Amino acid sequence: QKFQNGVITVGEFFTLLQVHVPIQKPRRSHLPASCAVSAPPTPEDLLYSQYIYRPKLRIYEEDCQALSQMIDELKPYANVQDQLLVNVNKSLWEVMRTCSDEELKSFGAELNKMKSYFTKESKILAHNEKVTLYGKLLQSAQEQHGKLQSRMEKVDELLKEAESCLVALEAVTAEHIRAFLAALFTHSFFAFLLELESIKAEEEELQSVLHLLWLVYLCRELSDLETQNEQMLAQMNQLKEKETSCQELLERYDFTEWEITEWSEQQAVFNFLYDSVELTVVFGPPIDGDVFGEDPSRRIVSLNFESLLDEEKAPPSSRLVRKLIFQFIESQGCWQEKCPTLHYLPQVLHEVSLVVSRCKTLGEEIEFLERWGGKFNLLKTDINDTKVKLLFSASTAFAKFELTLSLSANYPSASLPFTVQKQIGNIGEEEISAVLSNVPIGYHYLRRIVSLIHQNLLQDPR
């Protein structure tokens, strides 16, 4: 009843479809009781703290900060479950309220499949993040081991120097004892006492010099550590910037549009564009020793593309995208010749994905113009075969005309042929050509054409 009246929340809608999306509560870690004992640290504890616990704690803190940021970013999506379905997606509610129980059950089954897929994806992401974390811990342990080894070597050198000084001091002391005994028999005892006092002063001066050398060494080591720390922070910032830049490039140029739906000994099936295009690859006989059937030299018997799009129910933009994709597929001739073995299959998938990605973007552009064309004085968007007709009208410019653009599978890497039909005003082919010559080819080419026509021709009175 709540579903029919439009007062059902997203979470209740999932429950109605038997799709359960549990949100895990955060689990807080607590220090063990042994950590609360305040005992004076031993030298061994201090070494463990400096070279093991602190570096490890720093890495865990960085990981916790990243996880906290991710949680904060995901919280708004979790809160969507408490909002009304009508407010979140009114069109979905309007469609689903007219569905039968069987259709609702089927829709719920599809959502459960998607939930299962994303659950597996999240587990893979969590595993990869753990691998990254353990890699950082291992790298940190190796760096600290190297620092500790270097410090031990320096301390060994200082101990050797101190031992040599002690040996020299013992030799000098023995010599002066012999001199003392000789002084007793030569009646120069008082002169010897004076010499002994000077030796004690030299010993104290030597001890102070050794102490000063040790302080200088420690200060120098501390200065080196601070310099290394600054350099590491600078390198980390550079790496973070580089990581962000690489991530943006990966997201921008990720043209992987295919999904594997079947891989057996006999064939492989790939789907493109929301399962509307299917590629079936039939394999030849397996090669001896190829247990998994993935030997790059294995022969491919045939490659067949098939459209699974429902032409009657699909919107015009989807039918146009399908036509352009198959226009490209047919223009390539025999695909089996281009892909005689498994070695060439990744290249074929990449080439088809590039075309599918560009055509999918074109379909999204057309849907955008159909919905928001009024902002650009675009009255109507019509599709006929592979031609798009755009009807512009603006009272301020006293103009009404129809622009017809001829599309192909290589969109948007080439200029579009066009024709103009004037209905009101003086805007014709010459004016449109002048505008189109200033629109560079590339991403969102069609949208930029419409925007520049609106900006240059339809805003100011002519």
Image: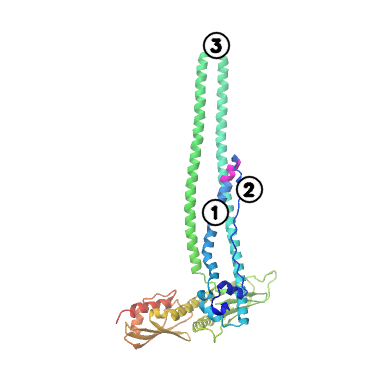
Residue at 55 percent across and 26 percent down: it is 169
Which segment is the magenta one? 44-50
Secondary structure state at the residue bearing disc 1: helix
Residue at 49 percent across and 48 percent down: it is 229
Secondary structure state at the residue bearing disc 2: helix
Q: Is residue 394 above or below residue 173?
A: below
Among numbered discs 2 and 1, the one appearing first in the sequence: 2
Image spot of residue 368 (x, y percent): 45, 78
Main secondary structure found in the magenta portion: helix
Image spot of residue 49 (x, y percent): 57, 45
The residue labelled by disc 1 is 61
Looking at the rendered structure, the kind of residue marked 2 is Ala
Left-right relation of 426 to 5: left
The residue labelled by disc 2 is 33
Foreground tag (3 vs 1)? 1
- Work out how far the residue at label 3 is from the one at label 2, CA to CA, in angstroms: 73 Å
Label 1: how many Cα within 10 Å (few below 14, some 14–19, many 20+): few
The answer, for residue 332, to whether it is visible in the render is no
